[in-house]
Amino acid sequence: MRRMLRTAALALVISLLACGIDYAAKDNEVKALLESAPPSSDYPNSGFVNLIDEANYAIKRDGSWIATTHVAAKICNERGRGIANVHLAYNSAFEKIKILHARTIKQDGTVVEVKPDDIAEITPFSSYAMYSSVKAKVMIMPAVENDCIIDYEWMVGGKHSIMPSHFWTSWYYQSQEPTVLSRFSLELPAGRRFTYTSYNTDIAPEVIISKKGKTRTFVWEGRNFGEINPEPYMPALSEICPWFEMSSVSSWDEIAAWYWKLVEPQMKAAPGVERAVAELIKGRETDAERAKTIFYWVEDKIRYVGLEFGAGAYEPHSAKDVFDNRYGDCKDQATLLVTMLRSAGIKAYPVLVPVGFRGPTGKRIPSPGIFDHAIAVAEIDGKRVWLDTTAEVCPFGDLPEVDRGREVLVVKETGSEFVKTPDYTADENGSFQTATIKLNEDGSITASVGWTSTGSTDLTARATYKYARPSKIKEGLEATATSITPSAKLTNFYVSDPSIRDQPLKIAYDFEAAGWANRTDKFLIFRPSLYQSVLSGTPFSKPDRKYDICFSGTSSNTSLTEISLPDGFKVEEMPRNVSLKADFGAYDVTYALDGNVLKVAEKLVRRDARVPAGRYQEVKKFYEDAIQAQKQQAVLRLGQPGHK
């Protein structure tokens, strides 16, 4: 399906004649594609095939614009029927939308039109007045069956660009499903300038000059793109699909100045905000203490609305409105946070984040479209402190992993700059587990397990336990215990308060279980490794691979297990120590006997790395060897005659 970031949008009453669309020609093209479309049997892994994926952007001399998009797709099987539920988002504050046609073409050639009464308009964020202009046209395509075609086209337009005199967008020729025809056209007044860059393709636009030379139309077209079969840890689609991006913006400084002009008026501290800040920081002696208090207040008191960056426009709401309403999207929360920090005398700035891109942002074509998130940064004791309140459980001074390792744009009145946010180190991101086990002579055990975490692992755990029902917490820990041994019975558990973010989240549970070790006449046989969540299975089971392996982020998982052996038993066979080293990770496990206590130490380190597909067998073997190391068994022998 179409994978394009729409230009920033505004309001325009649009008509079918505005773009001079030749519908007879389009119907002929659809007919030809239907007749030539390969049978569904040619795509056993695909739910549907994109027959036409097309968009036309027309930029007018007065700054208004019209975007027309046409989609025709063949549904191959039940897996593809989800695309018949069509959702066309727009912002009614500055856009107008019109559906030009929508129909289903059945396998026997029957055409079933979508009736106007079957098209609904919804307001996804109707509960939040500040975002009531975010709307969508929704329609369920009728008479959907295998080998039918769904075919629809719509127009969206605006009177002017949200960034005056500029436009930007991107276009993907390919998605995971096959595409027969992908076409993007851009119509501009002669003399309008823009730049574009293509990735993973050498497709160049055809340039068409109007008869009177008043307009130029650039047409990018590609055909017959195959399906993409997903693989674990594969690169992002932007790294393997053919696509391009374009922008009329000449520099990143221009974007920073534009965004500052949008956000600066919204960062006025209203009396209510100032009073709240004064009360919050009362008695706080350092900037760090004041900043932490304000950060936690925003994180706790302002509900996060997960609105796509840009969907609600780029201009944030005022700090006063966000403060009064007690909710906001990422840019609104960042604006309020910066405003409150400044009111407390702390230097702070809004930050634009390209969550979906981990490379050098500043080397890309300047475009607001690359940014899909907003956070804040404060200057405290000569250091940058990155702040993202949208995670809702993030400790002060930490930063969610999706924000890390990104070249972000720190927006200031002057001197805006690109800065790379810090990556996690292995010690900053991971988990630490301890387990104490008493093994009885019949193979049963009593066990106590403790677990703490840091970094991204900690944020995930906090979010899980913050919103989980108490009964579900118990059920989850029972499931964890039974994953260690099926007969486990949870006897006690404890989870620390996830809202206390300055202390590590702690989880502890006790259980007892029969048959953890297999008992024969003279032997006890068991697997000492208790940390089963480290490597519960390999994601690399296929014999070969097409794409590079991309491990994102660095982390470590450590487990220390102590097993008290039953009286009268001696170690007959000790598992061997294993040490696996690679540039993408490491796994170590050691076994040691201290009196009658068997001690097991495990550590898995994952490193941020991109491993070429040609080294797949090396990665595959690393995981297989680590799993086998965990599966090693210890053998105890009954050493005292007559002991049963």
Image (tube, rainbow, N blue to C red):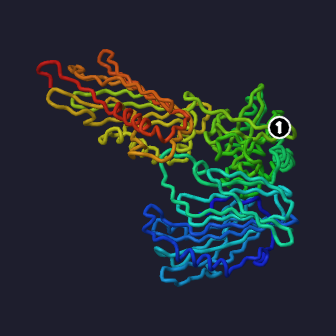
Q: Residue furthest bottom?
A: 110
358 on left or right of 602? right
x then y, percent, for residue 41: 42, 68
Question: Dot 1: few (<14), some (14–19), or many (≥20) neighbours within 10 Å?
Answer: many
Q: Quadrant of the C terminus?
A: top left
Q: Going 51% across and 55% down the picture, which residue do you hit?
A: 228
x then y, percent, for residue 370: 71, 49
Q: Residue furthest left?
A: 642
Identify which amino acid the numbered label 1 is placed on.
Arg
Q: Quadrant of the N terminus?
A: bottom right
- Of 529 and 414, nearer the camera is 414
Is the residue 183 above or below the residue 439 in the image? below
Q: Going 51% across and 59% down the picture, which residue do you hit?
A: 227
176 on left or right of 396? left
Q: Going 40% across and 41% down the picture, which residue do you hit?
A: 538
Q: Which residue is mark 1?
A: 342
Is the residue 554 above or below the residue 172 in the image? above
- Of 574 and 368, nearer the camera is 368
Q: Residue furthest top?
A: 595
x then y, percent, for residue 574: 28, 22
x then y, percent, for residue 6: 71, 60
Query: Is residue 96 visible from the viewing direction of this image?
Result: yes
- Of 124 and 163, nearer the camera is 163
Is the residue 206 above or below the residue 16 in the image? above
Query: Is residue 497 visible from the viewing direction of this image?
Result: no
Q: How many marks?
A: 1
- Of 118 and 173, nearer the camera is 173
